Image: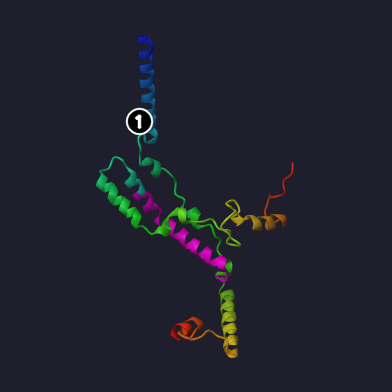
Amino acid sequence: MSMTSLKSMLAQAAVRGVTEARAAIFGHVLNPTGQRSAHKILRKKFIGEKVASWYPNDIQKEDPLVVARKEQDRLSKLEMLKRRGKGAPKKGHGKRAAKRNK
Amino acid sequence: MGLNMSDNRNLQDQKRRLLAEKFELRRKLYKAFAKDTDLPNDVREKFRGKLADLPRNSSFTRVMNRCVFTGRARSVYQMFRVSRIVFRDLASGGLLHGVKKSSW
């Protein structure tokens, strides 16, 4: 009985020595008792770059000619509406403001 | 180009993604310090406060994988970044490389 427990103690000591040596060589963080450790949070890799690159860049935004043309279209549309008298009302004259001020 | 409702959602999401990327390191550090059992309790409290002071939109949990084409928030596959409806349209049109209807 004591022979088997002595043998198991020796085996345990040998395994512990091996794990400690391995950790010393490769720089592992050991936690033989399994207590709560901050290493669990620190060991994960960073994901920020991958997350930030989900939406593809719109190449139309980089071409200045296209951007200028679109802006011109928007402005001319506004001009047309204003000519017809359908442009945006001045501040404080909209439907809601009129109702509030009445 | 920012004219639809879905584009507004996508812009918000992109804003959150950029913030999350910017604060990621800090966030991880504060969280790790706050949870370290070897530190005294008041130090842990201090870091817990610092973690709470970070802007809410810098959390990864607030980021939502929206469909790149339509802005749909549900049923978006990470592999293609599109929702199931757009996926079906693209795949049926042969625009997705290596994707074909399975039958066996």
Image position, residue A73 (x, y; %): 60, 80
Question: Is residue A87 left or right of A102 when viewed as pictured?
Answer: right
Q: Is residue A36 above or below residue B82?
A: above
Residue located at (56% from left, 61% from top): A56
Q: Which residues are magenta?
A: B1-30
Please state which of residues A87 and B80 is positioned toward the viewer in this rendering: A87
Residue located at (44% from left, 49% from top): A46
Q: In terms of secondary structure, where does tag 1 sit?
A: loop
Q: In the rendered image, which quarter contains the N terminus of chain A?
A: top left
Please state which of residues B54 and A92 is positioned toward the viewer in this rendering: A92
Q: Is residue B76 above or below residue A64?
A: above
* Quadrant of residue A33 within the rendered picture: top left
Please state which of residues B91 and A70 is positioned toward the viewer in this rendering: B91
Image position, residue A61 (x, y; %): 55, 70
Question: Is residue A3 left or right of A60 when viewed as pictured?
Answer: left
Residue located at (59% from left, 78% from top): A69
Q: Is residue A32 above or below residue B91?
A: above
* Quadrant of residue B96 within the rendered picture: bottom right
Please state which of residues A101 and B61 is positioned toward the viewer in this rendering: A101
Q: Does B5 appear in magenta?
A: yes
Residue located at (38% from left, 59% from top): B55
Q: Which residue is mark 1?
A: A33
